[in-house]
Amino acid sequence: EPIPMNAFLRAIAALSLVATSLSPARAADPAEAAAKAGLVPVAQEHFDHYFSRPGPGIDGFRMLHVEACTVEFRKHWLRDQNRGRPLSSRVTEREADRIRERLAATCRETLVEELTGATFNVVAEAGEGVLTLRPAIVEFDLFAPEVDAPTQVRSVSPSAGEMTLNLDFIVDGSLVARAVDRLRDRDSTLRQRTRVSNEFDTRAMLKRWTGHVREALAD
């Protein structure tokens, strides 16, 4: 939606507050973390990184259990968002918790939706013959969160944000494989960001990712 000129100048102030978020955060080394878990790199085409234990891995499973997703913001996300903001327009801990909880629910929802169908049976509990998926979002950087303020504050950004997806594959309580992907919103248009648009764009990111998960499990 085009931003009227009389609102654009106010939006520039909000844009300056999210500029620090546009610089990529230093990510943890996925290979180092996987090695500590006893996993080794495996070449494949579905994920940025994939690690597995020697053995059958995740092949052949048709019953899946999806655990709740966990979400962590990138380090100092809240501090950086509030740097330079007046007190009345700061992102609160309550709003950060709301964003985290909503994204966690969306992550699991999209994963279950993508995997439910003729090929896979998503079950309520782990058990014999069931492959458990444990998703975790880390280094989540929402560039321009909407805030409740007594005066209108427009948050604008050329992208909704980015995140790292870690997906652990577990059989009989043991970690057998891990996939790691870095996702970024593909929209590069400088526009106003709202709670609705941010949730729509993060869901779209997750939808693309869950498609890769389905393809990997179907191979």
Image (cartoon, grey):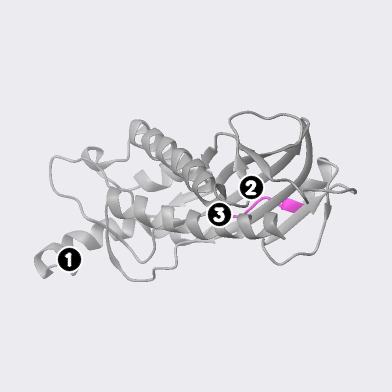
Q: Element at badge 3?
A: helix
Residue range of the region highlighted in magenta in the rendering = 24-31
In the displayed orientation, state which residue is furthest to the left: 6
Q: Is 26 in the magenta?
A: yes
Is residue 101 rendered to the left or right of residue 157? right
What amino acid is found at the position of numbered circle 1 in the picture? Phe
- Which residue shows up at 42% across the image and 47% down it? 80
Magenta segment, principal secondary structure?
loop
- The x, y position of residue 119, in whole percent, is 62, 52
Percent x, y for residue 59? 78, 51
Q: Quadrant of the N terminus?
A: bottom left
Residue 24 visible to the viewer: no
Q: Judge whether residue 82 can be spotted in this image.
A: yes
Q: Nearer the viewer, residue 140 or 25?
A: 140
**SS at mark 1 in the image:** helix
Q: Earlier in the sequence, mark 1 or mark 2?
A: 1
Which of the two labelled residues, at mark 1 and mark 3, occupies the earlier sequence position? Answer: 1
Up the image or down, 156 lies above or below 89; here it is below
Disc 2 is placed on an element classified as: strand
Q: Nearer the viewer, mark 1 or mark 2?
A: 2
Mark 3 or mark 2, whichever is nearer to me: 3
Distance of mark 3 from mark 2, alpha carbons? Answer: 12 Å
Q: Which residue is mark 3?
A: 210
Identity of the amino acid at label 3? Thr
Disc marking residue 8: 1
Nearer mark to the viewer, of 1 and 3:
3
Residue for point 39% across, 55% down: 143
- Cα–Cα span, label 1 and label 2: 38 Å
Query: Label for residue 166?
Result: 2
Left or right relative to 101: residue 176: right
Mark 1 and mark 3: Cα distance apart in space: 36 Å
